[in-house]
Image (tube, rainbow, N blue to C red):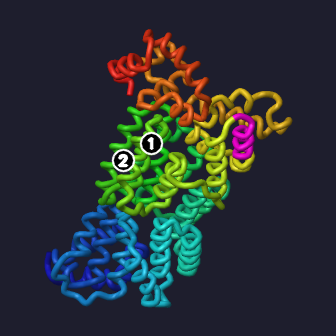
Amino acid sequence: MPVADASEARKEFIRGGGLIYPFRHGYAKLAHLLDKLQPDEWRQDEAVLGGLVMHLLKSGQASRAKSYLHAVNLEFEKTYQFELLDLLLALHLGEPVSDNKLASWRRLERALPISNALLQGLYYNAMMAMLVRLLRLEDARVAGQQAISCYREDGHSYLEHFIHIHLADLDVVDGRLRRAARGLRTAERCLEVSRTRYGNEEEVIEVIRLAIEYERGNLERVRQRAPDLRNSLLIGDSWSELFYQLARIGVMSTYFLKGRQAAQIELETYQADYARRHSGAPLTIDVLQAQVSHLEWHPNEAERQLEALDAAPIHSSIGQIVRDELQTALRLKELTPSATPRGAIVTALQHAQRVRGKLRRQHIEHAMRLALEERQIAPFIEHRDVFLGASARLTSGQFLRGNIPLSRLARQIVRAVEQSYVIPEELKALGFNSRQYRVAAALQSGLSNKQVARQLGISEATVKYHLTSVYRLAGVSNRIQLIDLMSNLEVF
């Protein structure tokens, strides 16, 4: 490349805003200018390095961007721009957030030029993501509103639409589904006003829309679309929490519709793709692995998997919430009340899991009342064993004293729960129903009848009753023969 052409390209890049060039003129023009620059110009100019990093982040090459940002022998004096690039890189990589890093990024706010609203908006945007990883969700919402204010001051509706997606994702995590849907509609309006498209903007919005579908029990739609959306996040815009949200709904939908083996394939695919897109260990996906083990009546295995994660903090709101729920379900920690709508439903179901009879039904009824406003079903499927022995009463004519909307939701929940038990074909051929499958599955993990009863929330007498049917269907006379049969059939 002639030096004169490279010099003109650099001047145009600086006149166009430097670090914020792609947000003023587009990523295609940025790529064109970068091609004209001298190969090592990024080492000599902080703004050029910034443009290169922004280009790589947009094209799904965050790990490569990191290698440029942390290269040795950089020949310029680092300013606030370098720190901002470090923050934006952390947003895309999903790396751990240390207290020192967070303090450093907070100081960065004072160094940003007051006159540059767009630059400030990028800062608040990235800080929002960092605070979400630390589960400081209210602080994250404040940062999100600050970013919206900055983007509106700058007239940048394209960047504003991302903040509404972030906020909608937080609402899904909290269980505020209607507000999340409104946020997505606002994001779509911002995108339409901007008349700007760089790649997978619609797919990013669809990830959160599918998360709402998952919470309302529409699992088949999630399972069908998740693979295409995952591929879209690999080559286009993405951030770690968005990827984790898709992993959560994709893996769990597959598990409840197709069973553990299919879910295991999904888990391995998401683990590999996360490492490819964001680098680092996908600890939240490891938590999902423990959740599947728990749902498959392997409490000891789930506990071991969680213990393996204790040494490393999980920098993801989704990962931390799922881990906390699992630890409570496994009685590794005490029940604690939650201020979020979804958390309150889960707490009620966890209370129900620890009692029986009428008291259990009262807790389930309370959870259903909490779920009615947002019509949530996923929390009940994820805590499905609480319905063992209670389903008939919950769908009877006397249930909920004539509250038609709530009775309708109860029937939907019970139906979804029953359908979520995917009986292996080998056991289905023997005539196993879902209740017999649950007992056999819990038994094969080495639990006693008493432990199985506790795990499933039923009486020991009920366990013995189901075992009688299980032995008859399997053509065996004791638990050892049953476990050997299931091992030979490779059911589990």
Q: Is residue 242 left or right of residue 344?
A: left
Quadrant in the rendering for residue 104? bottom left
Quadrant in the rendering for residue 1? bottom left
Which element is circle 2 on?
A: helix
Mark 1: few/some/many CA within 10 Å (<14, 14-19, 20+): many
Q: Position of residue 392 (x, y in %)?
A: 71, 27
Q: Is residue 359 magenta?
A: yes
Q: Are marks 1 and 2 in contact (CB under 8 Å)?
A: yes
Q: Looking at the rendering, in which quadrant would you find the C terminus?
A: top left
Q: Is residue 362 magenta?
A: yes
Q: Residue at image x 49%, y 90%? A: 114
**Is residue 20 at least partly visible in the picture?**
no
In the picture of the structure, the residue carrying the numbered disc 1 is 251
Q: Position of residue 452 (x, y in %)?
A: 52, 31
Q: Is residue 368 left or right of residue 21?
A: right
Relative to the observer, which residue lies in front, 471 or 313? 471
Q: Residue at image x 31%, y 77%? A: 50
Residue type pointed to by label 1: Val
Residue extent of the magenta highlight: 357-368
Relative to the observer, which residue lies in front, 68 or 130? 130
Q: Position of residue 474 (x, y in %)?
A: 45, 13
In the picture of the structure, the residue carrying the numbered disc 2 is 270
> Chief secondary structure of the magenta span?
helix
